Image (spheres, rainbow, N blue to C red):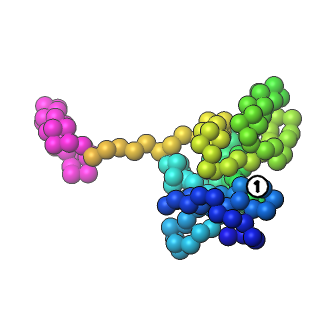
């Protein structure tokens, strides 16, 4: 707990404290050491099924088609960098994101950085959508009926299926 704050709510994954300044900061339980710490980009990426990459500065980021998400900002907030093609597009995106409660950190003509709370569902959804970041696809384990159908189809084509699911010619 920071300073002389008082507990507001506790759950298995999130823990919120109300600081003396009245700002509500969010802490998350990190799985690596089992201690309470600031929600970092690794926990965020795991929770939202997105891929982490290292950029040119060797920082962890979540890359998207029109921007990226990074950490390292105060109050355990994450930052979304957006790069738009026109000033009008940037202005529209900025207004929409600020209306959801995000804070502008850097404001350029066609690009900028906005800070968002990683535990606020609406802000996370908008940040991922604005940066064109899509979650990794999760495939389910095929049922025995699906495996039988695949084997029958492969036999009709004259191919043999390996256990890993890749085809090989006879």
Image-based side of 60 in relation to 86, left or right: left
Magenta stretch bounds: 142-168
Residue 81, picture quadrant: top right
Q: Is residue 124 above or below residue 92?
A: below
Foreground pick, 15 / 70? 15
The C terminus: image quadrant:
top left
Q: Is residue 127 above or below residue 118?
A: above
Farthest top residue? 88
Residue 18 percent coordinates (x, y): 71, 59
Q: What element carries label 1?
A: loop
Image-based side of 50 in relation to 118, left or right: left
Q: Can residue 146 be found in the magenta stretch?
A: yes
Using a 10 Å C-alpha cutoff, classify the residue at mark 1 as few (fewer than 14 neighbours), some (14 to 19) or many (20 or more): few
Q: Can residue 165 be found in the magenta stretch?
A: yes
Residue 140, picture quadrant: top left
Foreground pick, 30 / 6? 6
């Amino acid at each position: 707990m920071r300073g002389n704050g008082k507990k507001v709510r506790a759950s298995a994954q999130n823990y919120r404290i109300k600081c003396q300044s009245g700002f509500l900061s969010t802490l998350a339980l990190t799985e690596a050491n089992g201690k309470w710490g600031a929600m970092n980009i690794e926990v965020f990426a795991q929770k939202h099924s997105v891929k982490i990459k290292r950029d040119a500065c060797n920082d962890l980021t979540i890359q998207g088609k029109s921007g990226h998400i990074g950490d390292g900002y105060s109050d355990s907030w994450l930052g979304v960098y957006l790069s738009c093609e026109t000033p009008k597009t940037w202005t529209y995106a900025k207004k929409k994101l600020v209306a959801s409660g995000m804070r502008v950190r850097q404001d350029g003509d066609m690009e900028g950085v906005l800070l968002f709370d990683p535990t606020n569902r609406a802000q996370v959804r908008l940040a991922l959508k604005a940066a064109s970041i899509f979650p990794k696809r999760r495939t389910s384990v095929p049922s025995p009926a699906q495996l039988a159908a695949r084997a029958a189809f492969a036999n009709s084509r004259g191919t043999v299926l390996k256990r890993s699911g890749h085809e090989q010619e006879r």
